[in-house]
Amino acid sequence: MWQNGCRMPANTPGLQVPQFPFWEGSCMQPMTVATAASAAQITERRFNPDHLFYVVAAGVMLIFTAGGFRNFYLHGRAPWGRMTTQIMPLIVAHGLAMSGWVILFLVQSTLILTGRRRFHLVIGPLGGVLAAAIVILGTAVAPFSVHFSPQVYATLGGPRPFLATMFVQMLSFGTLVGIGLVYRRRPEIHRPMMLLATIVIQSGSLGRFPYIQNLATFPPLYVWGPVLLFGGLLFVLQWGMSRTPNRWYLMGYTGMVIASFLSVAVGSTALWNRMVSTIAP
């Protein structure tokens, strides 16, 4: 029997058919199809391997940040003792900006994983503010730090080469963030650039993290060594999770490798030593 375009159960003698509201004026099939489609969309969104990778990477970097700067967070001091008193406000502001960036990266990655892209875009400008603060403060802290506490950098290649590394890292971070912001409407470029920018500023965390901190004292790369190793491992992890190598990540990572060797080369030249002789003893 048909009613309102739907097949109704026949009144068979001896068979009691339960009367449900959805039989009246509607069919079950469209409802079932819509529910199945919605479930498929939710499952796909929740377990997108590429989106999940960025959350995993952000979580690992937050662990490195917390572990590497545990003395800063818990005791208000540097790993080697008291912070450089002459620039303590700059150091604190720089540390908070870097920590805020890593936390924001985790929040933004989680919003994308859970399908909250609109909110991700709303708080995006905060990343630009933090990035600008990191570049400005980092560029200021580095020369003051090597000037007032040159002995700290003796195991990292010396204060003058270390200063070249810090300047190049700030330049690399700002460049990667800039590319990410320009291509914010293209996730395949935006996401790896922001991840690589975060990896660059992990040099301080990795160089202070227990069990791996000695990697930052190996010449010729010093603090670049743990950064490049960590970045390479994340490339392999993403490849394994998404089953596809990310060419944009690989291009950005190649730029990081080139920048690291350039900073080492520049930091060891006589010209650089003369230029920074008034800053770093």
Image: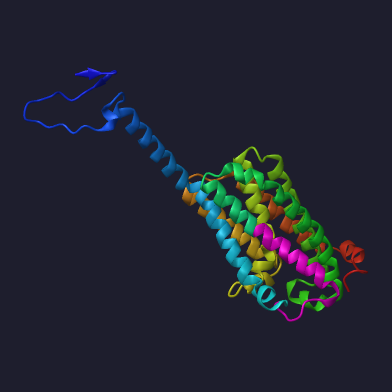
* Dominant secondary-structure state across the stretch colored magenta: helix
Count of numbered marks: 0
Which quadrant of the figure contains the C terminus? Answer: bottom right
Magenta run includes residue 228: no
In front here: 260 or 171?
171
Q: Which residue lies furthest to the bottom in this view?
A: 81
* 244 relative to 37, above or below: below
The reply, left or right, for residue 279 in relation to residue 37 is right
Q: Which residue lies furthest to the left in this view?
A: 14
Q: Which residue is drawn at 31% across and 25% down?
A: 26
Q: Residue at x 72, y 80 (%)?
A: 80
Q: Is residue 199 visible from the viewing direction of this image?
A: no
In front here: 26 or 231?
26
* 218 relative to 243, above or below: below
In front here: 245 or 56?
56
* 154 relative to 264, above or below: below
The reply, left or right, for residue 75 in relation to residue 149 is left
Magenta run includes residue 94: yes
Q: Is residue 256 visible from the viewing direction of this image?
A: yes
The reply, left or right, for residue 49 in relation to residue 247 is left
Which quadrant of the figure contains the N terminus? Answer: top left
Residue 10 at x, y = what percent? 15, 23
Q: Which residue is drawn at 30% across and 28% down?
A: 29
Q: Give the range drawn in magenta.
A: 79-102
Q: Which colour scheme is used?
A: rainbow
Residue 234 at x, y = what percent? 56, 56
* 73 relative to 28, above or below: below
Q: Quadrant of residue 204?
A: bottom right
Q: Residue at x 64, y 46 (%)?
A: 251
In front here: 242 or 75?
75
Residue 156 at x, y = what percent? 74, 72
Residue 225 at x, y = what percent? 66, 64
